[in-house]
Image (cartoon, rainbow, N blue to C red):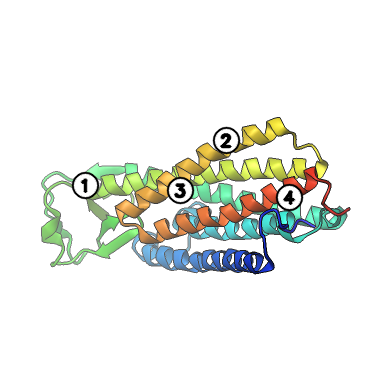
Amino acid sequence: MNQPSTSLFATDRRYRLFTGVKYLTYALLSINVYLFLQEEMSALSFTYAGALEPGQIVQSFAATIDTGAWVLLLLLFELETSVLDDSKIRGALKLFLHGIRGLCYIAIAYAFSGYYAELVTLYEVSLQPGLDACSLVGQNFSQLVDLDDYVLLDSDNCAAMGTQIVRLTGFDIIAQSDTLRAARLLAWTDIVNAAAWIGVVIVLEIEVRLQLRGGMSGKIMQVNKVVKLVLYALLLLAAVYWGFAGSFLDFWDASLWLFAFIFIELNVFEWQHETSQGLVSE
C-alpha cells in the first residue's frame, strides 16, 4: 500500500499524530471554501445585481470555485498517493478518479479566468478630476476599500476620499488612486498564486502518472524537484505579501495550502521510496 512506512515515522504514535494533523489541515481548508463564499457574497451586493452571466459568476466567485476545486483535488491526490493500493487504481476506479480530477482542472482554469477578469476590471477605470465624492451620496455608489471589499458611500466616509478619485467602468463604484493601486497588487498576487498552483499540480500529475506506470526516473525526479522548488517559493512570497498587506483570509488560506502540500509531497516521496525498494503491494 501507499502508506507511510517506518522510514518516515519511527513509531505508530508519530504516524497517528502525522495523520491527525494532516486531516485537520484538510478540514480547515474545507472551511475556507465557506469563508471565501461569505466574502464574495458580501462583495456581490456592491457589484452585480440581478441574474449573473457565466463570466460574472466566475469573476464574482473565483476564490470559492478555486478553493473548492483544490480541496477536492487535494483529497484525490491523498487517495492516490497514500490511501489506495497501486493495484486498486485500475479500470473503472482509475477512470473515475481521473475523470473527477479532470473536472477539478476545468474548475481551476475557470477560476483563473475569473481572477484575470477581476484584474482587468481594476484597470478599466475613468479618472474623475475635481469630483466631490459627497455629491454622490444617496445615489447607491460604493467605495472600494480593498480587493473584493466595498462600503456604501455615505456622508461619513465621502469627505475622506480627497480629490484623486477614479470610477470603475460599468459600476457605481469609486476609489481613491492609492486604494486602487493596492487592490491591483492584490489582484496580481491572485494571478501569480493561481498560476503557480496550476504549475504545481501539473508537476504532481506527471509524477503520479509516471509512478503508476513505473516510469519515474531519477533525472525526471530531479527536474521536478527544481521546478517545484521555484513554484513553492512563488507561493510562499504570495503568502508573505498577503500577510503584510493585511489580507488575513488569503494569508491564512495560502499558509494552509503550503502546509497541506507538505503532506502530499511526503506521500509522494514515500511512495517513490517504497516503489524503488519493491515495497508497494501488487
Q: Amino acid at mark 2?
A: Val
- CA gap, disc 3 to disc 4? 35 Å
Dot placed on the residue nearer the N-terminal end, 2 or 3: 3
What's the residue at 81%, 40% (across, down)?
A: 214
Which residue is labeled 1 in the image?
Answer: 178
Q: Amino acid at mark 4?
A: Trp
- CA gap, disc 2 to disc 3? 24 Å
Dot placed on the residue nearer the N-terminal end, 2 or 1: 1
Viewer-nearest residue: 148 or 129: 148
Q: Amino acid at mark 1?
A: Asp
Q: Amino acid at mark 3?
A: Tyr
Q: Which mark is on residue 227?
A: 2
Viewer-nearest residue: 14 or 46: 14
Viewer-nearest residue: 151 or 16: 16
Q: Does residue 34 appear anywhere in the picture? A: yes
Q: Is residue 192 above or below residue 267?
A: above
Dot placed on the residue nearer the N-terminal end, 4 or 1: 1
In this rendering, would 11 be left or right of 175?
A: right
Dot placed on the residue nearer the N-terminal end, 4 or 2: 2
Q: Is residue 225 above or below residue 151?
A: above
Q: Is residue 278 above or below residue 30?
A: above
What's the residue at 36%, 52% (across, down)?
A: 242
Residue that lies at the very extreme toward the front in this rendered image: 10
Dot placed on the residue nearer the N-terminal end, 3 or 4: 3
Q: Tag 4, which secondary structure? A: helix
Which residue is labeled 4 in the image?
Answer: 271
Which residue is labeled 3 in the image?
Answer: 115
Q: Which mark is on residue 220?
A: none
Q: Tag 1, which secondary structure? A: helix
